[in-house]
Amino acid sequence: MKKYKRVFVVVLDSLGIGHLPDAEKFGDVGADTFGNILKTMGTLNIPNLQKLGMVNLHPAGNMKPVDKPMARYTALGETSNGKDTMTGHWEMMGIYTEKPFITFTETGFPKELIEELEKRCGKRVIGNKSASGTEIIEELGEEEIQTGAMIVYTSADSVLQICGNEETFDLANLYRCCEIARELTMKDEWRVGRIIARPYVGKKKGEFKRTSNRHDYALKPTGRTVLNAMKDAGLDVIGVGKINDIFCGEGITETNRSNSSVHGMEQTIDICRKDFHGLCFTNLVDFDALWGHRRNPEGYGEEIEKFDKNLGVLLEELREDDLLILTADHGNDPTYTGTDHTREYVPFLAYSRAMKEGGKIPEQDTFAVIGATIAENFGIEMPEHTIGHSILEELV
């Protein structure tokens, strides 16, 4: 069987394609991220996604399938109990998550947690609600600077975020407080997926700006993943975007931080132009963070169009022995109620110049087919207790 020297997995963060059969349990019946964006906008200028087979996989709006799609395509269901970034990415690489991460979107963090955080950090907490990061800095930044308090907030994700002004809070102290928060939220009843340091600069409303010194304190994966097995075998595992944070550095040999999804694709294209042997794993977060949670289908659609332009460049750069996989980690329907992720199928589009033809392949019931397929391709064993089965034979 043909084996690929390099595999590129690009995660279009939150680009779901319709609710899963168990969506009622999550309150997500009727969610359809890609479909509802197309219904809202009518059409999108996405010639590269279209020729790969994205619209064949999920027709909607005024867009029509192509006669001969270039990619092998299908829908992937999520078997883990959750609909968040970490659960989705971990499952791709073989981890089944039974207990979902906790969110505090509706209530803010418990009084006991906040009191302990204040005591250990030596700072009064302000905020403690679900909010946009830029908006809460505008609202409370001046108070934080003037009083020495610290802004704590959450979102629709399983996160606890702490804002700190770099000039008055001090980065080292901000990171220290986040490390304390990480320690406190290891308790089951407070267990969130990530603690995020959100530094900013500026002295007054209208001038505040977040900096690139963000730092994530994620939980380590609950077991070894395909990434660990690849690294142990001497293969390259290159992370782009927040991949390194999602896996807490486990199994990663090189990391590239991105300042936007467009930048993340530019980095992926640059990596494609270099020689390596193994996996380039890219997360493009702006679909989710900028548009899904903010319920902006037009912005989301325009972000997909920006992605498609760089996808065209990447397709031109791919070599004969490269395999490209496009997928997502959950849904975040920008037309749906609330601001939360949505429990959806995700797309799976696989393309190589070496493929004889494109077309539909059988639907899969777990994201873990991605990691298992990569493992078989590189001739490595799946770590103990991982899930997933390879579909490599479908991708030649």
Image (cartoon, grey):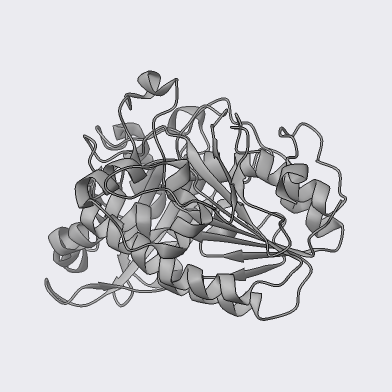
Q: Horizontal placement of 127 versus 321: left or right?
A: left
Residue located farthest toward the front when viewing the structure as drawn = 67
Q: Residue at x 32, y 33 (%)?
A: 31
Q: Residue at x 52, y 70 (%)?
A: 257
Q: Position of residue 18 (x, y in %)?
A: 39, 34
The answer to whether any part of residue 230 appears in the image is yes
Query: How many numbered circles are shown?
Result: 0
Q: Quadrant of residue 79?
A: top right
The answer to whether any part of residue 122 appears in the image is no
Give 382 or 67, whichever is nearer the viewer: 67
Q: Residue at x 50, y 76 (%)?
A: 266
Q: Position of residue 239 (x, y in %)?
A: 62, 64
Q: Position of residue 357 (x, y in %)?
A: 66, 53
Is 111 rendered above or below residue 334?
above
Q: Horizontal placement of 292 versus 47: left or right?
A: left
Q: Horizontal placement of 274 versus 169: left or right?
A: right
Q: Quadrant of residue 365?
A: top right
Is 364 rendered above or below residue 333?
above
Q: Residue at x 13, y 74 (%)?
A: 204
Give 250 or 73, whichever is nearer the viewer: 73
Is 373 rendered above or below residue 307?
above
Give 353 or 91, whichever is nearer the viewer: 353
Q: Position of residue 347 (x, y in %)?
A: 50, 44
Q: Quadrant of residue 390?
A: top right
Q: Horizontal placement of 110 versus 6: left or right?
A: left
Is 373 rendered above or below residue 271?
above
